[in-house]
Amino acid sequence: KSRWSEVTMAPADPILGVAVAYNADPSPKKVNLGIGAYRDSEGKPLVLQCVREAEKRIANDEALNKEYLPVQGFDRFLKITPQIIFGKDSPAVVEGRVAVCQSLSGTGALRIAAEFIAMYNPGTMVYISNPSWGNHHTIFKKAGLKYLNKTMGLDFDGMVADLSAAPRGSTFVLHTVAHNPTGVDPSQDQWKKLADVCQEAIFDTAYQGYASGDLERDAWAVRYFANTRGLELMVTQSYSKNFGLYGERIGALNVAVKSKDTAAKISSQLKGIVRPMYSNPQLHGARLVTWVMEDPALKALWEKELKEMSDRITEMRSSLVAALVEINCPPPNANFRNWNHITSQIGMFAFTGLSEKHCSLLTGKHHIYCTKNGRFSMAGVNPSNVKYIAAAMKDAIN
Ligand code: PMP
């Protein structure tokens, strides 16, 4: 008898499972609206030119070797990554009050944050929006936070009430920009009110530059909390989407605190978490983003390409709504009067309002793959498939 014979099959991940099903479908008509990864207007994955250029420079530099990085990561990356999110002139950055640790992208940063919180405040209640990115729950073993009303708008009063009533010492996972899965963010005025009631926050930043096409604008909430209000907070950064570096696993955890001395102590503890987990992070992704972010010309190219990706997605939102209107597709349910929510949402995803039944018809009958909650990755929409998608949506609803 095997030592492992008691092991049962784990359920498939709800998001990654969609990709598996898509890959197995032989239909030439198939469309993947499940995966949160950019596709160009021909439906192909994209490697940014700024990344290609950085890759060439790295490959041609024979002075570079492949030694281990320090536990906390590549020093030049650790210096520049907080500047991207907090801003170059951020008092926390300038005064050295941010503890930074390179991570295995956004997921890894969240995992280190969770370990750190559990180490010092084991009973902490972590509030996560409802709905949220599914992995947040498994990473934090959450509590629930009201977030949406039935029309997919932000239930702001409910959110403020929940934040205010939270027990002392709670922490809140906030999506810095381009909320996943809804594409609905608080307004600047709403963020200001949230800063009044929020005790501690983790700003999960997976889409900086993706929402508005502008790195600075998409960092507004973090900069307001940290720079304007001087609040202590954590920021997890991912360079998966905004650099198209999904497989390189590059990101960071930033802990902004009130003193340089505390930041140094936190840094040392973060190393203590990383060392027994995976010893030290990967090198290539850290070099790539550092090479781009440090070089003004490459950084400008990155920002241009980021804007192009963001613009294409925004365009596809309008095209999808236009295609739905053209064929008189009724709204997904009685809570909606039209499809305008698709164009008012931002970021990578559209939270369409389609039910689980609609989604299974889309997949079963039309080979269109999306998560069961009606979330479409808009990056999968392109001029060649947008009408097909709209027609299938109408068929599923009717
Ligand atoms: N947070 C959110 C909200 C996300 O949508 C994602 C990616 N889907 C991540 C974090 C982490 O992604 P990665 O680990 O690739 O950086």
Image (spheres, rainbow, N blue to C red):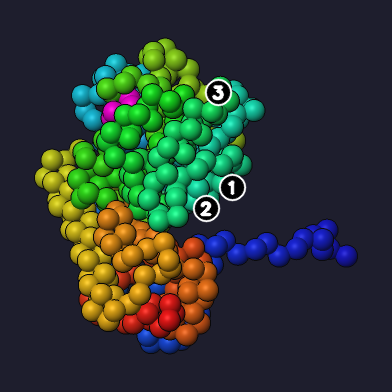
Q: Is residue 252 above or below residue 335?
A: above
Q: Which residues are magenta?
A: 222-226
Residue in the foreground of this view, choosing between 211 and 272: 211
Which residue type carries mark 3?
Gly
Q: In this orientation, does residue 255 appear?
A: no
Which residue is label 1 attached to? 138
The quarter of the displayed image where residue 190 is located: top left
Q: Quadrant of the N terminus?
A: bottom right
In the image, 290: left or right of 332?
left
Q: In this orientation, does residue 218 appear?
A: yes
**Cα separation between marks 3 and 2:** 23 Å
Which residue is label 2 attached to? 134
Residue in the foreground of this view, choosing between 142 and 21: 142
Which residue type carries mark 2?
Gly
Residue in the foreground of this view, choosing between 227 and 326: 326
- Determine the residue positioned at 20% across, 45% down: 214
Q: Are marks 1 and 2 in contact (CB under 8 Å)?
A: yes
Counting from the top left corner in percent of width and height, residue 262 is at 44, 15
The quarter of the displayed image where residue 100 is located: top left
Main secondary structure type of the part rendered in magenta: helix
Q: Is residue 57 above or below residue 353?
A: above
Counting from the top left corner in percent of width and height, residue 395 is at 40, 83
The quarter of the displayed image where residue 275 is located: top right
The answer to if 201 sits in the magenta stretch is no
Which residue is label 3 attached to? 169
